């Protein structure tokens, strides 16, 4: 079926992004995998391409386009090529919405020009050891100094994508104790300079997949954060986090759908070239049936994604809608990628084949952004259960 969610401008952008990935990422991606990180200078190239500034106002060097569809195209093209762009997805997909909604004019003037160019890379630090999806249980604290000039940040975070290369990190911390009637109260967002004294990067985590993204542990010991770097209002951080979750979860759905689509592409190409018993694997009925079943699932995921993209741009994407999209698309991707790897036989287990890397990269989709078990809980509540 013909997709109608993208127009000519979108498709022109897709061609630009595809050419960039083929020339600037594919030839060096194996080196990134070997190093376990994308080089910091690569983000300057993304800045020059303009991908960081599409949704940033023109006065700060951006394009001023209010649409998530361009970010979706970047996700789709990245997955199509079987590569990863390091922590850049967090910079735009997760951090930018908070900055656009909550930053003051003064903060935007300080941060957005560097955000657009790639000179100031952002990450966000929510998860802590032992808390997982229970953000209200965080223990990192930020106490206001006696003279009211700065906060003193103490604690630790884990699973922070982009944490190694980040220049600024949106840190979620307790600026007040929780209330008996509301344990979510007292959380604030601080945009912390990673060059601050007392800020240390712990381990760069050795992950099963997404190996080019710099996922790290962060530790804070008496880090001084100027009050001018408070994002939004004090103690209202939890509500801010909830407002951005639908977009975050839709982006995961988009990425998962695109991974599943890429898996079919890889499996089709492989089975057409690989011969057993005197004929291509693609000519066996089982191969045709498996790929046909996978295609039907991907078609359904595409419809869910496109409906979600339209709803997000219209300001109508609800938390339940986003949870449903994430749950469905990530489960589809899990099934499709597994079946496509099986069609590769033993070679599907070898990392030099993109299907193997895709299999490992895909697994986290059902965990981050809220586990799929949490998504089921959200959907059930939306059903009145």
Image (tube, grey):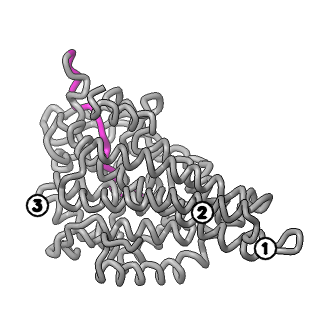
SS of the residue at dot 2? helix
Image disc number at residue 280: 1
Farthest right residue? 277
Apparent side of residue 313 relative to residue 31 in the rendered image (left or right): left
Q: Earlier in the sequence, mark 2 or mark 3?
A: 3
Q: Quadrant of the N terminus?
A: bottom left
For marks 1 and 2, give the CA distance: 17 Å
Pointer 1 and pointer 3: residues touching (CB < 8 Å)?
no
SS of the residue at dot 1? strand
Q: In this orientation, which residue lies closer to the viewer: 319 or 149?
A: 319
Image disc number at residue 292: 2
Q: In this orientation, which residue lies closer to the viewer: 184 or 345?
A: 345
Q: Quarter-wise, where is residue 309 in the image? A: bottom left
Pointer 2 and pointer 3: residues touching (CB < 8 Å)?
no
| Image location (x, y in percent) of residue 269 | 67, 74
| Image location (x, y in percent) of residue 341 | 68, 58
Q: Which residues are magenta?
A: 166-180
Q: In this orientation, which residue lies closer to the viewer: 97 or 221?
A: 97
Residue at the image position 40 percent from the left and 38 percent from the top? 127
SS of the residue at dot 3? helix
| Image location (x, y in percent) of residue 294 | 57, 59
Apparent side of residue 51 relative to residue 269 in the rendered image (left or right): left
Residue 365 vs 353, above or below: the answer is above
Residue 152 vs 107, above or below: the answer is above
Q: Quadrant of the C terminus?
A: top left
Residue topped by disc 3: 105
Residue 328 vs 113, above or below: the answer is above
């Amino acid at each position: 079926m013909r997709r109608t969610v993208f127009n000519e401008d979108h498709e022109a952008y897709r061609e630009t992004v595809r050419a960039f990935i083929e020339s600037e990422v594919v030839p060096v991606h194996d080196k990134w995998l070997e190093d376990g990180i994308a080089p910091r200078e690569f983000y300057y190239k993304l800045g020059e391409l303009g991908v960081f500034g599409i949704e940033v106002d023109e006065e700060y060097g951006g394009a001023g386009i209010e649409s998530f569809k361009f970010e979706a195209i970047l996700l789709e093209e990245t997955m199509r090529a079987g590569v990863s762009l390091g922590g850049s997805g967090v910079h735009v997909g997760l951090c930018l919405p908070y900055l656009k909604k909550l930053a003051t004019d003064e903060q935007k003037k300080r941060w957005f020009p560097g955000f657009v160019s790639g000179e100031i890379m952002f990450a966000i630090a929510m998860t802590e050891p032992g808390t997982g999806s229970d953000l209200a249980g965080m223990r990192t604290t930020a106490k206001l100094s006696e003279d009211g000039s700065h906060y003193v940040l103490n604690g630790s975070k884990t699973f922070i994508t982009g944490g190694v290369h980040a220049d600024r990190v949106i840190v979620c911390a307790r600026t007040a104790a929780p209330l008996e009637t509301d344990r979510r109260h007292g959380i604030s967002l601080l945009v912390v300079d990673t060059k601050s004294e007392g800020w240390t990067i712990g381990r760069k985590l050795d992950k099963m997949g997404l190996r080019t993204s710099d996922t790290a542990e962060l530790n804070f010991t008496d880090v001084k954060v100027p009050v001018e770097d408070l994002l939004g209002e004090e103690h209202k951080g939890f509500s801010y986090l909830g407002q951005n979750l639908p977009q975050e979860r839709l982006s995961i759905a988009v990425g998962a759908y695109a991974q599943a689509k890429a898996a079919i592409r890889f499996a089709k190409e492989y089975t057409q070239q690989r011969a057993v018993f005197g004929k291509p694997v693609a000519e066996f009925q089982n191969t045709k049936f498996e790929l046909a079943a996978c295609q039907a699932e991907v078609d359904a995921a595409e419809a869910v994604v496109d409906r979600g993209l339209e709803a997000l741009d219209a300001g109508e994407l609800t938390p339940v809608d986003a949870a449903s999209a994430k749950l469905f698309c990530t489960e589809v991707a899990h099934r499709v990628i597994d079946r496509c790897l099986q069609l590769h036989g033993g070679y599907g287990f070898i990392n030099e084949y993109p299907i193997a890397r895709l299999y490992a990269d895909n697994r986290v989709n059902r965990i981050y952004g809220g586990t799929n078990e949490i998504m089921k809980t959200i959907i059930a509540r939306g059903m009145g259960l």
